[in-house]
Amino acid sequence: MIRVYEPENGGILFQLGEIGDPTQGFSYSPDGQTLAIAYQSGLVELWQINPQKLLLSSDSVFTSPTWYTMVSADSQYLLAQRADVVDVYDLGNGEFISRFPSTTLGVSPTENLFVTTEENGAMYLRELPDGKIIRQMWGHQDRIYQARFSPDGKYVLTSGKDCRRILWQVKSGAIKLRLDPITVNAIGEEHTESR
């Protein structure tokens, strides 16, 4: 369940979600006017914050949860990460645009770019809305768990099953920094992985 609060006085503006369908994640659009919500059932919703209005609701035909959602830099596209796929929606008309295989998702806060990743450690920088591949980048030896853009959109930081953390330059695709692998001795885990 998500509660949206009034920033000035802390009062609740509205509440979304139900106990029967927990939220998995949420994100605000770059302009702060809309809220994208991912639900355990697979449902994806986009809400205008003030005044409260449902702008998009994907028909939940998926059996897997939606892990998280992100909104494009121009607030025209909604991207939703499910188990090993990324869905792209047009926020102008609410239509589904495309789907890409991906183990994780990163969306640029400054340009209409996003990254998708594969089980083998490959990462693709793509354009919105069509997903055209700008470049493929290699540096991980296994599945990438996280890919996040820096606030200025110049870098992508990734973390993978190979325990590597890599900072990539978006413009060139070059590796700016490769951090030493980290392993943690976690209780009850046979294998230790970076996340």
Image: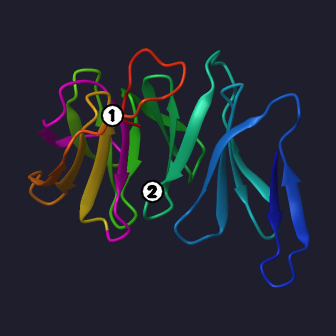
Q: Residue 189, image x and y in percent?
A: 48, 19
Residue 26 appears left or right of 85: right
> Measuring 43% from the left and 23% from the top, which residue is drawn there?
84
Furthest-bottom residue in this view? 8
Rendered image: mark on residue 72: 2
Q: Are marks 2 and 1 in contact (CB under 8 Å)?
A: no
The amino acid type, in three-letter code, at marker 1 is Thr
* Magenta-colored stretch includes residue 111: no
Label 2 neighbour load within 10 Å: few <14, some 14-19, many 20+: many
List x then y, in percent, for residue 112: 34, 57
Alpha carbon of mark 2 to alpha carbon of mark 1: how far? 33 Å
**Compared to 134, does 30 lie above or below?**
below
Asked if residue 137 is among those painted magenta in the image, a careful observer would answer yes
Element on which disc 1 rests: loop
- Neighbor class of circle 1 (other Cα within 10 Å; few <14, some 14-19, many 20+) is few
Q: Answer left or right for 147 relative to 164.
A: right
Query: What secondary structure is marked by label 2?
Result: loop
Among the two numbered marks 2 and 1 on one chain, the one whose residue lies closer to the N terminus: 2
Residue 68 position by quadrant: top right
| First to last magenta residue range | 129-152
**Along the line of sight, which residue is nearer the eye, 183 or 130?**
183
User: Residue at the location (63% across, 25% down)?
Assistant: 65
Image quadrant occupied by the C terminus? top left
Residue 75 location, x and y as percent? Answer: 51, 61
Whether residue 68 is visible, yes or no, is yes
Task: Identify the image quadrant of residue 111.
Answer: bottom left
In the depicted structure, whether residue 103 falls above or below residue 27: above
Q: Quadrant of residue 145?
A: top left
Amino acid on which disc 2 is placed: Ser
